[in-house]
Amino acid sequence: MMLATLFAPLLALQSVGEAVVAIKNDNPETWSVEYPRLIQPYVQDYRRCLAVTNRTVTGVANFEAQHAADLPRCAERRAKAIADSNAALAGAKTAMTPEEVDQLFANIGRIHIARGADLDKQFRQRLAGAEAASTAYEAGRPKGLVIELRDASVVKARTDASAAAAEQDKDSQ
């Protein structure tokens, strides 16, 4: 009984290594990737290499180009991840051909670039919204000199009082 209790977690962990993990793009009409859990560390390592970098916000929509520049920067990590994945999958229950593994990592790169393109789209939409708000404000704001923002009767009473005082000064001279 005790021996079975010791081996049960090991058997469960062994079967978990063969489960399929899916990562889907925000737009399911483009790319999705599925791979055995056995190669998850290699996939995560490559995705981490792509994602962990400094992004520069320059006021120009260039996030897609910045994301595309991550692919050559992580080329060595990708090659190692593909080789390690193929080695791990050799003889595994869940089989992927080397071509499928290569396609998997290519799709991960495409998804990474698509995320940068999505950031560019959001950036352009925010700029267009800000420009529209500024244009609407300029069209609706008062033109000319605004003396006081008070009730019109207060302004008229002050104008009348100063006019009467000016007339009295003129008459007294």
Image (spheres, grey):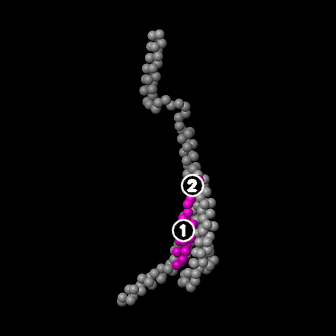
> Where residue 48 is drawn, which disc sits there?
1
Image: magenta residue range: 38-58
Q: Horizontal and vertical percent for residue 20?
A: 52, 76
Q: Earlier in the sequence, mark 2 or mark 1?
A: 1
Residue 11 placement: quadrant: bottom left
Residue that label 2 marks:
57
Against 52, residue 155 (above or below) is above
Give x and y (percent) for residue 168.
44, 13
- Which disc, if any, is residue 68? none
Q: Residue at x 42, y 82 (%)?
A: 9
Residue 133 is situated, as x and y percent measured from the top left of the image, at: 54, 45
**Of the residues shown, which amino acid type is indicated by label 1?**
Arg
Q: Tag 1's secondary structure? A: helix
Residue 137 lies, with reference to residue 33, above or below; the image says above
Magenta segment's dominant SS is helix
Q: Residues within 10 Å of mark 1 (few under 14, many from 20)?
A: few
Near-viewer residue (119 or 79): 79
Residue pictured at 44% horizontal, 82% vertical: 12
Q: Type of residue at label 2? A: Val
Residue 54 visible within the image? yes
Quadrant occupied by the N terminus = bottom left
Mark 2–mark 1 Cα distance, whole angstroms, equals: 21 Å
Left or right position of 101 against 157: right
Q: Is residue 52 left or right of residue 5?
A: right
